[in-house]
Amino acid sequence: MLNPKSAFFSATLALALTGLFAATAMAQSKSGAGKIVCWKDKSGKVVGCGDTVPPEYRDNAAKELDSRGMTRKNVESAEEAAKRREREKDLAKQKEVERRRLAEQKRQDAALLNTYTDEKEIDQRRDRDLQQVDLQIIQIQASLKNATDRYNDAKKRNSKEDLARAGGEKEKIEQNIAAKEKEKEEIRQKYAVQKKRYVELRGGGQSAAAPVPAPTPKK
């Protein structure tokens, strides 16, 4: 509840603004101008009305009224305008990203239909790629055997220098094999996605015209 002094001040301010608006409206009506500008403070409260906004309030929100006191136009503050432009900029950027994604999806769909004649060809391509990686793993495993032999030999001889070198070589080769195993899993996933989309485009799933949803950003 407002105390008597605050209530009196608010009532006085409201009365002063009402009188100011009435006087301004009357003056503008006589002059034939027909436009009144009421400016606001940082909190959004109207603090004055007149022909033009005082310099110290020009970055604040305001509203234009006609001679009858009806709001004709709301003017946003400089801060609000900056925030709106930033929102519009972000929205435009999001739309452009989505447009490019859909264009790329359309290109991939066309390439998919032009590359394969049926689903079996996708499986065959996947198997060939996996075989290639398997051959690479076999070659790397041969190198791992040699590196392991050198490591064990250095261990028997208790040669710290040779043991460290052979151990580092052995670890590097093991990491290479792990990377190849990961590559195989990525190949399986890649062709699983292609096959699923191919079936959809050929009418075996959802509508061919439906685009693939955008991936969910990783948190």
Image: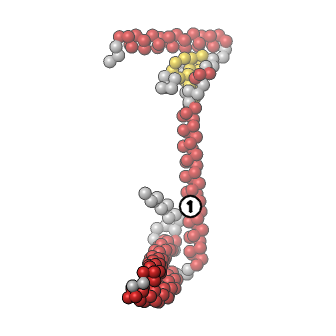
Residue at horizontal 56 percent and vertical 70 percent from the top: 109
Residue 43 in view, yes or no = yes
Relative vertical location of residue 147 with respect to residue 3 in this rendering, above or below: below
Q: Quadrant of the C terminus?
A: bottom left
Residue at 58% over, 40% down = 85
Residue sitting farthest toward the left: 1
In the displayed structure, does residue 51 sit left or right of residue 200? right
Residue at the location (55% across, 33% down)?
Answer: 79
Viewer-proximal residue among 83 and 76:
83
Q: Indicate whether 72 appears above or below 2.
A: below
Q: Nearer the viewer, residue 179 or 2?
A: 179
Indicate the position of residue 134 as horizontal and vertical percent values: 47, 86
Q: Position of residue 168 (x, y in %)?
A: 46, 78
Residue 73 in percent (x, y) is at 58, 27
Q: Is residue 162 left or right of residue 79?
A: left
> Does 133 appear above or below 215?
below
Secondary structure under badge 1? helix
Say what amino acid the circle numbered 1 marks.
Answer: Arg
Residue in the picture at 50% in, 11% down: 16
Q: Nearer the viewer, residue 203 or 58?
A: 58
- Please provide percent x and percent y for residue 86: 56, 42
Query: Is residue 131 at least partly visible in the picture?
Result: no
Count of numbered marks: 1
Q: Classify residue 4 by image quadrant.
A: top left
Disc 1 crowd, CA 10 A, few/some/many (<14, 14-19, 20+): some
User: What quarter of the picture does the N terminus occupy?
Assistant: top left
Residue on which disc 1 sits: 101
